[in-house]
Amino acid sequence: MIRIYLDWNVISNLKKPEFREIKDFIITHKKHLQFPYSPAHFADLMKSYKPNNEHFHTDLETLEFLSEKHLIRWGEKEIEPLFATPKEYFEFEKDKENIFELIDMEKIFQDLDESMHELGLKKMETSTKSFYQSQPSGIEITEESKDILKKMFPNLKSNSTMWDLMKDMEPFSKKVLQDGKYYKELRNSLAEKGFRLEANSGRWNYDEVVRNINNFLQKLGVKMTFLEYVELSFKHKKEPVNPYEYYITAYLILDMIGYRTDKLPKPTDNMLNIQTDGEHSFYGAYCNYLVASDKNLRIKSKVLYNQFNISTKILEPNDLIPELKKVIDPDIKEINFLEEALSFCTKENLVESFPASEENSVETQAFRLPKFYFNYFNYVIYTYYPKQEGFVLTFRKVFKNLSRFIYYTESESLIERITDFFGYENKEELRVKKQEFVYKENNIVFDWSFDGGLIRLENEEDTKRPILSYIISTKGIMVST
């Protein structure tokens, strides 16, 4: 299946007449497409949550139709592809604990104290709290930084302790995330100190942005690159920074220093809007396509995808149908599958080549496919075996984005597509083999023999992802692989 990430504006606009063509196209081709949803979608959706709001329920129904059960989210240490309908996720989301309560230091230690008391253990509050009260804040107040620090932490003094800073963190975090006016003032304060890109930075080519920011930082006397500046945000973090935190921080810093700055025009807009856009960008990097109405979201994503070598293609909504028409593999059975497969092996599609040598007579070439073959595979490996007088075409799913997983439904859909194309008469046997292929570790293989060749569908040993091979003999004896 072709994995597509739609930002919230696209999803919510599908109910409008001007998006009818896109919605109809999705309905017609939905069995070939997959639309994961993420917590970022719910961050946007919950802004309109009221039990009697018809638009909210319409948008929730649309999200459920598109995504079915395909949820993608960042867990504690890695990305998690999960199965849960948006309605099921909504039941969890609407009662979610307030994030700002989680950083209320007095409440944290009070809860800890009560828990220790229930366990019959002595109180920890005094000793732990005293430790933080005895440690300096670690923040140096200078002439250059005092104005901004005053805005961020109004109670901070030169003799403030780590406990003072921890207590100030909750109101600052709440204000910067929820108060759009305060965030814009903070952003302007940085600009007044010279920490803002030139006015025409929005016209920079996406592949020049990070280099230009590095030059900007150098001119300011900041002896670090953009990425080193991002890493500085985690200086006091004890645990290693994870990819999710790193990416979102990079996205936010682009906005903070004035690159394609979000104007936040509505009274209810705030920094959370920008963070949510950053999350859409991050989760989009696990898909084949990111489709976004917001131009700033598209361009910032291009900058970061280029920097982190992510091949996810970024589209605006009007480009989605023309693009999908090029890459969807239509259901056409009256076709010579081998002739079509060989037609992919052209100079224009060549990615890598390993010619035969004295030590190894086998010749191998890798080709990028011009479409998603069986709406799944995106690369084919051609291997020629001169001694056996035959060749093998091996179709694979190669990830050039952040994703390293496939959903079970993708394997199921692929098996259905291939067995429908090549035929499989014993339906009960097919049902059992499909279950074992997708959900178990058994080495299940689907084979189809024909004159001069063999078709084989199996799970790759190391990745456990499906691969499809056409094993062809040019002299009547099949190549052994």
Image (tube, helix red, strand yellow):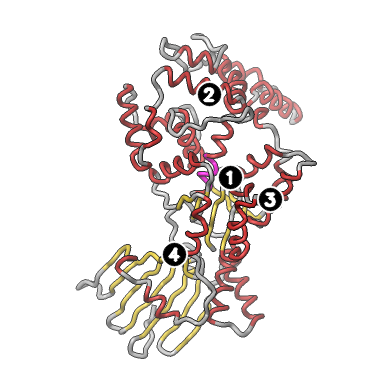
First reached walking from the N terminus: tag 2 or tag 4: 2
First reached walking from the N terminus: tag 1 or tag 4: 1
Kind of residue at disc 2: Lys
Kind of residue at disc 4: Asn
Q: Quadrant of residue 362?
A: bottom left
Name the side, left or right, on which 323 lies relative to 97.
left
Mark 1 or 4, closer to the camera: 4
Badge 2 element = helix
Q: CA distance from mark 2 to mark 4?
A: 44 Å
- Residue with the mark numbered 1: 75
First reached walking from the N terminus: tag 2 or tag 1: 1
- Residue with the mark numbered 4: 378
Number of residues whose C-alpha sits closer than 10 Å to that of mark 2, classed few (under 14), some (14–19) or many (20 or more): some
**Front one among 404 and 214:** 214
Where residue 348 sits: x, y (%)?
Answer: 31, 65
Q: Which mark is residue 86?
A: 3
Q: Which residues are magenta?
A: 278-283
Where residue 407 sits: x, y (%)?
Answer: 57, 60
Q: Is residue 421 above or below residue 15?
A: below
- Residue with the mark numbered 2: 184
First reached walking from the N terminus: tag 1 or tag 3: 1
Q: CA distance from mark 3 to mark 4?
A: 29 Å
